[in-house]
């Protein structure tokens, strides 16, 4: 797990490393990228790299968290479920290289944990509105996160032309407009 | 990736290794289990182990495939979506130790790929019945597999008392009785 915190110099070095990683991901498959290449491309020393990150999967994990932080910033106080879903799709469709690397690094669990947290915070008014108990809420938010993540995964790995509106429409057509639970 | 095929002696050794692994998983966390322990508990040689498997995650991957094979056998010609879902939950709720190890081994992707394949085969009549095109079918089957996997994950990690009927009912209440698409 990366060790960066709020230290300005560490954040600067981490940003350099992330830029290097991004550059490499544009032309190479995640599995073919080595830490040596990341160091060479980003211009930081090996000691600095290992002070901040355990390995290359730690770098994409950090990048993932940055994308979610940016997503939260972009959504602002918005809590309309459609806008939340649209913003989520938009930001990840603009980060396809990183998304594919996350899948290749097997970070499914980490992605869905973050996503459950983000949409859980955004949509918690649903819990109160519908009067869901904690058990149902846990099922709801984790399954909903899995649906959104998988919709993105299918889009990015199989239907690269699909935009965020296409994906939302498909989800709504196939599974009903969420949260379905509003109707109960 | 394990190398077992249809060779009887390899299958016998693999079964011994799986039994050893099962025994270890009953008392230990996946992360604490070593290949040396697996070898000692199962009574096979180290050379045999590495002829068949790359590492311990390969063992749980093989065990996972065996469970899916057994699931297909149990379901027989049944194609009622409710029965399919119920059988899936039943078999995995009887394999909680293995399921937790699969999660710890980060085999989310492999699990969902297998599950998409199994339910895709079972439910392909839906594709024809509703007249879904290939794109919608891909979204449907992968997202449905993610929902079922995640429901199991939430049950096994957070609500250990839930039985397969409880999980099905919760899914139906929260997301509508699937496949919703029948209604369109």
Image (tube, coloured by chain):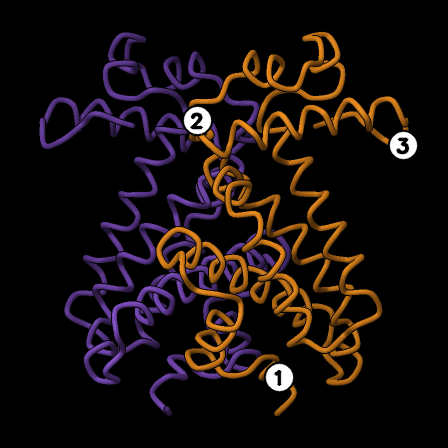
Chain colours: A purple, B orange
Judge whether A85 appears above or below A154 on screen.
below
Identify the residue shown where x is 47% and y is 58%.
B150
Which residue is label 3 attached to? B6
* Horizontal arrangement in the rendering, residue A157 relative to residue A38 (left or right): right
Residue shown at the point (37%, 25%) measured from the top left: A20
**Subunit of label 1:** B
Nearest the eye: B152 or A122: B152
Question: Residues at marks 1 and 2, common chain?
Answer: yes
Q: Which residue is mark 1?
A: B181
Q: Which element carries disc 1, helix, strand or loop?
A: helix
Q: Dot 2: what SS?
A: helix
Report the residue marked by disc 2: B31
Q: Position of residue B140 (x, y in %)?
A: 62, 70
Where residue B162 sits in the image (x, y, percent)?
43, 64
Question: Which of A65 and A129 lies nearest the eye of the viewer?
Answer: A129
Which quadrant would the N terminus of chain A be assigned to in this image?
Answer: top left
Q: Secondary structure at mark 3?
A: loop
Task: Say which chain tag 2 marks.
Answer: B
Say whether marks 1 and 2 touch (CB < 8 Å): no
The quadrant the C terminus of chain A occupies is: bottom left
Q: Residue furthest left?
A: A7
């Amino acid at each position: 797990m990366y060790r960066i915190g709020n230290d300005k110099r560490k954040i600067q070095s981490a940003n350099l490393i992330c830029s290097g990683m991004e550059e490499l991901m544009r032309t190479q498959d995640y599995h073919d990228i080595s830490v040596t290449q990341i160091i060479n491309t980003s211009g930081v020393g090996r000691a600095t790299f290992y002070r901040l990150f355990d390995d290359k999967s730690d770098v994409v994990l950090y990048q993932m968290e940055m994308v979610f932080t940016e997503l939260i910033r972009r959504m602002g106080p918005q809590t309309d479920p459609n806008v939340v879903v649209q913003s989520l799709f938009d930001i990840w469709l603009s980060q396809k290289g990183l998304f594919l690397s996350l899948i290749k690094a097997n970070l499914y669990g980490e992605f869905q944990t973050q996503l459950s947290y983000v949409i859980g915070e955004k949509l918690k008014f649903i819990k109160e509105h519908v009067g869901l108990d904690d058990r149902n809420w846990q099922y709801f938010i984790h399954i909903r996160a899995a649906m959104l993540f998988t919709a993105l995964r299918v889009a990015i790995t199989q239907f690269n032309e699909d935009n965020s509106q296409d994906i939302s429409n498909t989800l709504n057509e196939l599974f009903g407009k969420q949260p379905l639970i509003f109707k109960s």
